[in-house]
Image (cartoon, helix red, strand yellow):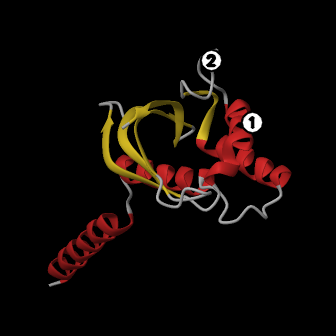
Amino acid sequence: MLDRRVFIGVGALGVALVGAGLFFWSDDEDEIRELLDRLTRAVAPPSSGAANPAFRALDLRGALRELFTADAKVDAPELAETGPLGVDEVVAASMRYGERYVGSSITLTRLGIEVSKGGETATCEALAVLEGGGAELGRRDERELRFDLVKVDGEWRIARVTVGPRR
């Protein structure tokens, strides 16, 4: 009788652990989606021009350093004639061009995430949509993006972003 109770107890514990794993265990794709959500929130222009540019630059730099690898590059041809930008250069470009995007929103859609077999690298292709903002309330820009990601100390980080031309 005792053997049967132990067997049932162990079976119930096993089912509970599997159930908890399904609800609380995040996979790599979920972690990458969360990382890109955090990126979208970090780079979103302020809702009004009242934000102090110095504080905005510090906040953006801090957020990007949490999301990107130390040597990450952003390849956005219209922002740099000299080639891909590092995080500090992206922040500087954001401060130069940010005023025209005040009040706009940015969303990432059509995320296509591929994680390597070893689970240490990944790529994500997405469509970035910027709408509204500034004097052009009806503005809508769409760009294809490619993110190259790596795991650093068990956490996903962006190693490179390639920005396609306007669609």
Q: How many marks?
A: 2
Local secondary structure at mark 2: loop
Assign the N terminus to one quadrant of the image: bottom left
Residue situated in front as seen by the camera: 31 or 89: 89
Q: Residue at position x 29%, y 31% from top?
A: 117
Reading the chain from its start, which is encountered first: label 1 or label 2? 2
Of badges 1 and 2, nearer the viewer stands 2
Q: Where's residue 146, x and y in %?
A: 41, 33
- Identify residue for label 2: 81
Please give the name of the residue rendered at 61% of the width and 29% of the height, measured from the top-left corner: 79
Judge whether 19 appears above or below 112 on screen: below
**Is residue 143 found left or right of 3 in the rendered image?**
right
Residue nearest the observer in this picture, 68 or 133? 133
Residue 29 versus residue 72 in the image, above or below: below
In this rendering, would 116 be left or right of 6? right
Query: What residue is at 52 percent from the left and 61 percent from the top?
Result: 137
Q: Can you give x and y, in whole percent of width and height, for residue 136 in the image?
A: 55, 56
* Callout 1 amino acid: Ala
Q: Residues within 10 Å of mark 1 (few under 14, many from 20)?
A: some
**On screen, residue 116 above or below 126:** above
Q: What whole-number distance in Å separates the C-alpha atoms at marks 1 and 2?
A: 14 Å
Eyeballing the image, is 121 above or below 14?
above
Residue 123 falls left or right of residue 46? left
Give neighbour class at mark 2: few <14, some 14-19, many 20+ (Cα, 10 Å): few
Question: Label 1, on which residue?
Answer: 92
User: Within the image, what quadrant is residue 134 found in?
Assistant: bottom right
What amino acid does circle 2 point to? Answer: Glu
Q: Do residues under tags 1 and 2 come within 8 Å of each other at their CB atoms? A: no
